Amino acid sequence: MGEAIVITSGKGGVGKTTTSANIGTALALQGKKVCLVDTDIGLRNLDVVMGLENRIIYDLVDVVEGRCKIHQALVKDKRFEDLLYLLPAAQTVDKSAVKPEQMHKLINELKQDYDYIIIDCPAGIEQGFQNAIAGADRAIVVTTPEVSAVRDADRIIGLLEKTKTVESPKLVINRIRNHMMKSGDMLDVDEITTHLSIELIGIVADDEEVIKASNHGEPIALNPNSKASIAYRNIARRILGESIPLQPLEDKNKSVFGKIKQFFGVR
Amino acid sequence: MKKRQNVTIKGTKDGIVLHLDDSCSYEELKKELDEKLSANQTNEGERHLTPVKVDVGNRYLNDAQREEIKNLIRQKKNLVVDDIESNVVTRAEVDKLKAENEVVTVSRIIRSGQVLEVPGDLLLIGDVNPGGTVIAGGNIFIMGSLKGIAHAGVFGNDQAVITASSMQPAQLRIHDCLNRAPDKAQNAEKREMECAYIDDNHQIIVDRLQVLINLRPNLNRFEGGH
Ligand SMILES: Nc1ncnc2c1ncn2[C@@H]1O[C@H](COP(=O)(O)OP(=O)(O)OP(=O)(O)O)[C@@H](O)[C@H]1O
Ligand SMILES: [Mg+2]
């Protein structure tokens, strides 16, 4: 029986879809059987980032409404031997087309066949969010080092903490720019983690390679030579229970690294 | 046999006290009160109003009855009822009083969009994040950082105080007073171990925690000791 992890943020555009694609890919690289589920109905993206758009036949709403079997709607990622699948969102209807109970049932079925179900959540706190968390066992909250993103993350964490079925959420800080943190123009990792007071599970630098890779439909996690890729792979390994200290960002900034050590390794 | 007096009037150093017996019926009591006050009429004309206290012993008076007694006394004399004292309170009143005098301990983070409300004092072991709100009928003691809104003394207690280990509130409210954070933080100096209270000018003042020792001696609940 697998585990379902929802990737959420509150604020839009902070990197939920990118994080979902890369964590899913990195888990598959570790030999786990993974199903990505795009719950951003009406604004689907995950298929594009994964480069699987052209092979979609059925979608999540078709499954829920009984127009097809789950396995018919799953799109296989040919880069992996039977390890990575995507259940795409519908594009023609809106988020009210699905109810939380239906999502719960769907995710439970997927958990029979997959080690990890990675659920890409839409922005906001309305129905789409409720659908995305309905079947989740764990949650990862993505934020960027911006005050507004952190504020929304705080709101989301509050909602997740009230949801008894979801284990205490973990934090990913995305799009970190070292020089801005150093100059104090951006919240630093320490500030954000103290403020949100949940466990940090990864930090990812702001890196244009991430954007390029997404545009080519090749998640950056497939590239073994990129810093961002290593960051995502490390998140995957931490999900699997390994304890890996956080990587220092590009230019070995002592102060950031020093702070990170407080959260990982030293326990 | 002489009838027992149901209404007795006493002058004490604090003023006049009307003792109303608690063993007769309410109707009887009203009647006698009416008679007694009429009999004692002293036609001194326009004298200033004298405040009296009313002691009803072990009788429970509901709000309507309290009003009735007050009116009766006011009509008859140059007397105005200052306070009605009764030894009896209802269970609901006791529960409310108890809740309002209790310190509720909560250990969690009040996050953006969340509101925590308690009838009495609040002891929060955790932070109030921006966008979060804590409300108390009494005092608010925050062991962590206050970055959101705190509202103490909501039911009208202007003696209530707010304390925080780290005081960086978006807004402070005590009773009906409001104090907002400056739009631009003047200096990033951290404000640690501070308190907020209403001063004589009805303004919320933020100061060192220790000033409360003199300003709010009622915060002490511990009696005796060395
Ligand atoms: N670490 C990163 N470095 C650089 N660009 C990034 C990074 N992470 C995400 N991005 C870019 O930010 C944009 C938004 O990312 P993404 O679509 O993953 O966000 P989202 O939270 O899913 O957005 P939405 O709320 O619209 O679903 C994309 O263009 C993506 O390529
Ligand atoms: Mg998205």
Image (spheres, coloured by chain):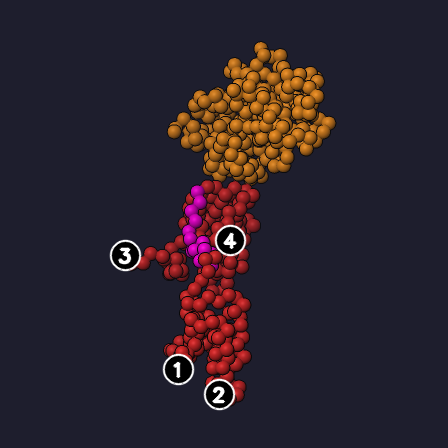
Chain colours: A orange, B red
**Labels 1 and 3 touching (C-beta < 8 A):** no
Asked if the magenta segment contains residue B62, the reply would be: no
Q: Which residue is mark 3?
A: B225
Observer-nearest of A140 and B101 = B101
Which chain does tag 3 point to?
B
The kind of secondary structure element at disc 4 is strand
Instruction: Residue B200: give its label.
Output: none
Observer-nearest of B223 and A24 = B223
User: Are dots 1 and 3 on a single chain?
Assistant: yes
Q: CA distance from mark 4 to mark 2?
A: 51 Å
The kind of secondary structure element at disc 2 is loop
Q: Tell me residue A46's x, y (percent).
A: 64, 23
Which residue is pictured at 48% across the width and 78% down the height? B33
Residue A29 seen in render: yes
Residue extending furthest top?
A81
From the image, state whether disc 2 or disc 1 is nearer to you. Answer: 1
From the image, state whether disc 4 or disc 2 is nearer to you. Answer: 2
> Mark 1 or mark 3: which comes first in sequence?
1
Q: CA distance from mark 3 to mark 4?
A: 32 Å
Q: Tell me residue B193's x, y (percent).
A: 41, 49
From the image, state whether disc 2 or disc 3 is nearer to you. Answer: 2
- Circle 2 packing at 10 Å, graded few (<14), some (14-19), many (20+), is few
Observer-nearest of A217 and A63 = A63
Q: Which residue is mark 1?
A: B2
The kind of secondary structure element at disc 3 is loop
Q: Which residues are magenta?
A: B93-107
**Dot 2 amino acid type:** Thr
> Mark 1 or mark 4: which comes first in sequence?
1
Q: Which residue is mark 4?
A: B151
Residue B131's place in the image compared with B46, above or below, is above
Q: Which residue is mark 2?
A: B42
> Mark 4 or mark 2: which comes first in sequence?
2
